[in-house]
């Protein structure tokens, strides 16, 4: 007899069942429903999720602000993949008695994707591949990373890995964030500078900050103009860290050399969006964490969270 209803959200690749034995939850009275397509609106999300007691969310693909949580009277457990999720109002969840739990994640997935995008842009790989498949041959000239300067905005776990990759490629590394110390920068092989210096002196700037009220729009027109016509912006963190309108203008008017992006203000990115048609870009659909290794930890951890909650001893609780 079903006691609980569980929703797995945004399983775009329809692989959640490959990484955790969800069918075993039937023995605990849990009926599992998988949603593979994104909700087109909060209203659609609320209508679909209203009957569910347990929700497993994939990163920030579906948002859970206060008014959404208040419209889900049956929700008791909300699992997010990863140990932080800016799209969940933890205070509102706590007030409503909803347990929010997280999972481990892969420390390598996002940094490796960052470096892949950077290299793809530097060597013009997307254009060259498309030309080759269309019957062409060499179409442009790339640039090397050795001897260039990389600016890392946010020298946390991911930023430190990126600094290591840069040093391995023979690059100089600059770093900035609001609370970064010279000692912490030096320990990662970087030199602490001001934000203005970082954008002015770097050939490539890569963003690795968490999105918050303090960091939203932290890269705007002024920073992009400092980066200049030979500068590349890489963003695999969160889209709203960058003023999107300013970035589109920078690309269209040639303020910067280009942009390599895995994240966007609106996701999935609409087909007619200006960034899809903007020049000098390499784009990917927020796949920084989409690896077998990461999914094993995400879905496996989510399954553990559900089992622990059902046993009365929840683990990895983010609001308790």
Image (tube, helix red, strand yellow):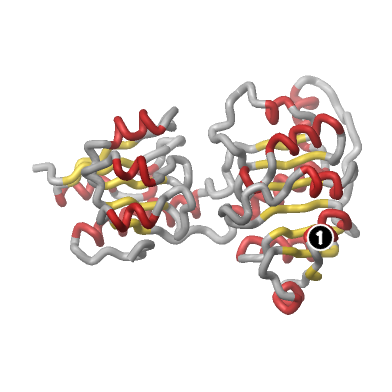
| Residue at left offset 22%, top offset 49% | 24
Q: Alpha-carbon neighbours of circle 1 within 10 Å: few (<14), some, or many (≥20)?
A: some
Q: Secondary structure at mark 1?
A: loop
| Residue at left offset 21%, top offset 44% | 74
177 and 184: which is toward the camera: 177
- Tell me where residue 308 appears, x and y as whole percent: 25, 61
| Residue at left offset 39%, top offset 44% | 64
- Tell me where residue 252 appears, x and y as whole percent: 81, 30
Which quarter of the image is occupied by the N terminus? top left
- In the picture, residue 263 is in which quadrant? top right
| Residue at left offset 78%, top offset 43% | 221
Which quarter of the image is occupied by the C terminus? bottom left
190 and 24: which is toward the camera: 190
Q: Residue furthest bottom?
A: 183
Residue 268, can we see it? yes
Q: Note whether 65 is above or below 39 in the view shown.
A: below
- Tell me where residue 206 appears, x and y as whole percent: 73, 53
Q: Note whether 103 is above or below 192 in the view shown.
A: above
Q: Which residue is mark 1?
A: 169
Residue 160, can we see it? no
């Amino acid at each position: 007899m079903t006691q609980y209803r569980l929703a797995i959200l945004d399983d775009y690749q329809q692989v959640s069942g490959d990484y955790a034995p969800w069918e075993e939850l039937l023995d605990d009275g849990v009926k599992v429903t998988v949603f593979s397509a994104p909700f087109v609106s909060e209203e659609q999300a609320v209508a679909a999720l209203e009957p569910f007691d347990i929700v497993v969310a994939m990163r920030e693909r579906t948002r859970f602000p206060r008014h959404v949580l208040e419209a889900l009277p049956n929700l008791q457990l909300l699992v997010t993949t990863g140990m932080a999720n800016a799209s969940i109002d933890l205070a509102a969840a706590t007030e409503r008695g909803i347990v929010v739990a997280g999972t481990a994640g892969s420390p390598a997935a996002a940094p490796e994707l960052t470096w892949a995008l950077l290299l793809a842009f530097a060597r013009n790989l997307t254009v060259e591949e498309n030309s080759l498949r269309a019957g062409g041959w060499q179409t442009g000239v790339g640039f090397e990373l050795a001897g260039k300067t990389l600016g890392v905005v946010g020298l946390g776990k991911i930023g430190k890995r990126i600094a290591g990759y840069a040093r391995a490629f023979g690059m100089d590394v600059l770093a900035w964030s609001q609370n970064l110390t010279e000692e912490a920068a030096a320990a990662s092989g970087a030199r602490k500078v001001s934000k203005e210096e970082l954008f002015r002196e770097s050939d490539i700037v890569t963003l690795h900050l968490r999105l918050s009220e303090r960091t939203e729009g932290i890269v705007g027109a002024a920073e992009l103009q400092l980066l200049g016509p030979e500068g590349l912006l890489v963003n695999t963190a969160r889209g709203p860290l960058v003023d999107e309108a300013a970035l589109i203008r920078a690309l269209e008017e040639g303020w910067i050399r280009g942009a390599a992006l895995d994240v966007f203000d609106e996701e999935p990115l609409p087909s007619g969006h200006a960034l899809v048609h903007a020049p000098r870009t390499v784009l990917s659909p927020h796949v920084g964490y989409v690896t077998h290794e990461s999914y094993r930890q995400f879905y496996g951890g989510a399954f553990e969270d559900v089992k622990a909650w059902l046993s009365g001893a929840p683990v990895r609780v983010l609001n308790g």
